[in-house]
C-alpha cells in the first residue's frame, strides 16, 4: 500500500500528480520560495543547480500572502505547471524526483 498525503483540496497528492502529470519541458521552471540570508535556501539553490533545473527565486518577504503561506517553512520548491510543492527538508535526489514527478 502506498502511503498518501493530502493537499488542500483533500485529494491524495500521488493520485493528483497522476491525474495532472506533465513532463518537465524546457519551458517549465521551478519556483524557489526563499528569503535573504537563508542558509537552507542556498543549499536548495545548489541542489537545483546540481539537477540542472530551470528555476527562479521568489523572496517571500516581498509579499504578505507569501509570508502567511510559507512563513518559516522555506525553502519551498513549486512546480506551477502541475500545482505541486516540495517543502524542506529535501535532498538532491528528492529534488530530481520532484522535477521528474516521481514523488
Image (cartoon, grey):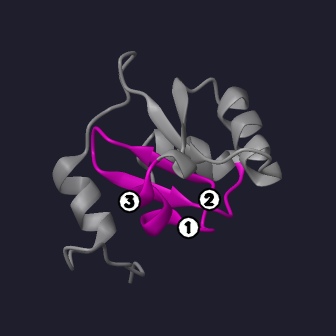
Residue 65 numbered mark, or none: 3
The mark closer to the camera, 2 or 3, is: 3
Mark 1: secondary structure = loop
Residue found 71% across the figure and 53% down from its top: 91
Viewer-proximal residue among 54 and 42? 42
Does 69 appear above or below 60?
below
Residue found 64% across the figure and 62% down from its top: 88
Does 55 appear above or below 84?
above
Q: Is residue 103 visible?
A: no
Viewer-proximal residue among 70 and 48? 70
**Which residue, given by chain and number where applicable, does mark 2 sit on?**
74
Give neighbour class at mark 3: few <14, some 14-19, many 20+ (Cα, 10 Å).
few
Q: Is residue 98 visible?
A: yes
For residue 9: magenta? no
Q: CA distance from mark 1 to mark 3?
A: 10 Å
Viewer-proximal residue among 65 and 52? 65
Task: Looking at this view, name the residue that lies furthest to the top.
Answer: 26
Q: CA distance from mark 2 to mark 1?
A: 7 Å
**Which residue, given by chain and number where applicable, does mark 1 sit on?**
71
Answer with mark 2 or mark 3, whichever residue precedes in sequence. Answer: 3
| Percent of width and height locating residue 63 | 44, 50
Q: Is residue 78 left or right of residue 80?
A: right
| Percent of width and height locating residue 54 | 52, 23
Answer with mark 1 or mark 3, whichever residue precedes in sequence. Answer: 3
Image quarter hosting the N terminus? bottom left
Mark 2: secondary structure = loop
Residue 2: quarter of image: bottom left
Which stretch appears magenta?
63-91
Amino acid at each position: 500500500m502506498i502511503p498518501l498525503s493530502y493537499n488542500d483540496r483533500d485529494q491524495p497528492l500521488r493520485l493528483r500528480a497522476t491525474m495532472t502529470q506533465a513532463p518537465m519541458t524546457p519551458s517549465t521552471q521551478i519556483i524557489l520560495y526563499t528569503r535573504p540570508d537563508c542558509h537552507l535556501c542556498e543549499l536548495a539553490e545548489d541542489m537545483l543547480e546540481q539537477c540542472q533545473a530551470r528555476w527562479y527565486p521568489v523572496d517571500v518577504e516581498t509579499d504578505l500572502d507569501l509570508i502567511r503561506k510559507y512563513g518559516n517553512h522555506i525553502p519551498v520548491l513549486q512546480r506551477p505547471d502541475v500545482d505541486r510543492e516540495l517543502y524542506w527538508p529535501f535532498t538532491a535526489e528528492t529534488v530530481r524526483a520532484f522535477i521528474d514527478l516521481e514523488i
